[in-house]
Amino acid sequence: GGVKQRVVFEGCMFSRNSAASGGGVAVEAGGRVLFDRCCWFNNTAINGGALYIAGGHVQVLSSNIASNHAHRLGGGACVSKGRLSVTGSQIRSNSAARYEGAVHVQDSRLASVHFSDSMLENNTSPPHPLITHQLDELALR
């Protein structure tokens, strides 16, 4: 299962986990989740090596998403629906076998991503290492 209500994680580490979607955490429709000072390290999934969002609103504050791998989409995170907001965080050294080593958005009509004061570096995948190029709403500050 996944998270379906308001949940706050403070200072948590998600490490060496494996799943079909969201190696570290999967957030389902209607979920509201805040991750404050958390770390995702060395997680693996088919989609969303560290984090998979299938609806709801996920906020990542002052956190690190590093060295995670997706066998298909989004080594750091995969957003199929909902909103991902990343502030004061690092997304680095993640990889995906197909698309977007950092963050993959499956459908920009259903998902949005917002970055503020964050660093994305050394993420790898064959065609697009950082973020999918088909986003309608992407904010980088």
Image: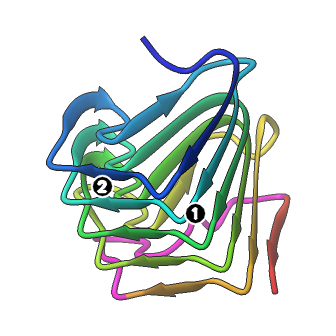
> Which quadrant of the rendered structure holds the C terminus?
bottom right
Does 64 sit left or right of 89 as displayed?
left
Which residue lies at the image location 41% right of the left edge and 52% below the top edge? 12
Amino acid of disc 2: Arg
| Badge count | 2
The kind of secondary structure the magenta stretch mainly shows is loop
Does 104 sit left or right of 14 as displayed?
right
Disc assigned to residue 132? 1
Residue 50 locus on image (x, y percent): 36, 50
Which residue lies at the image location 75% right of the left edge and 18% below the top edge? 30
Q: Decide: few, some or many residues near mark 2? Use Cα within 10 Å; few <14, some 14-19, many ≥20.
A: some
Disc assigned to residue 47? none
**What stretch of residues is rendered in magenta?**
122-136
Amino acid of disc 1: Thr
Q: Decide: few, some or many residues near mark 1? Use Cα within 10 Å; few <14, some 14-19, many ≥20.
A: many
> Which quadrant of the rendered structure holds the N terminus?
top left
Residue 100 locus on image (x, y percent): 43, 64
Q: Which residue is mark 2?
A: 98
| Helix, strand or loop for disc 1 | loop
Q: Is residue 25 above or below residue 108?
A: above
Looking at the picture, tell me which residue is in the foreground, 101 or 85.
85
Task: Please tell me which of labels 1 and 2 falls first in the chain.
Answer: 2
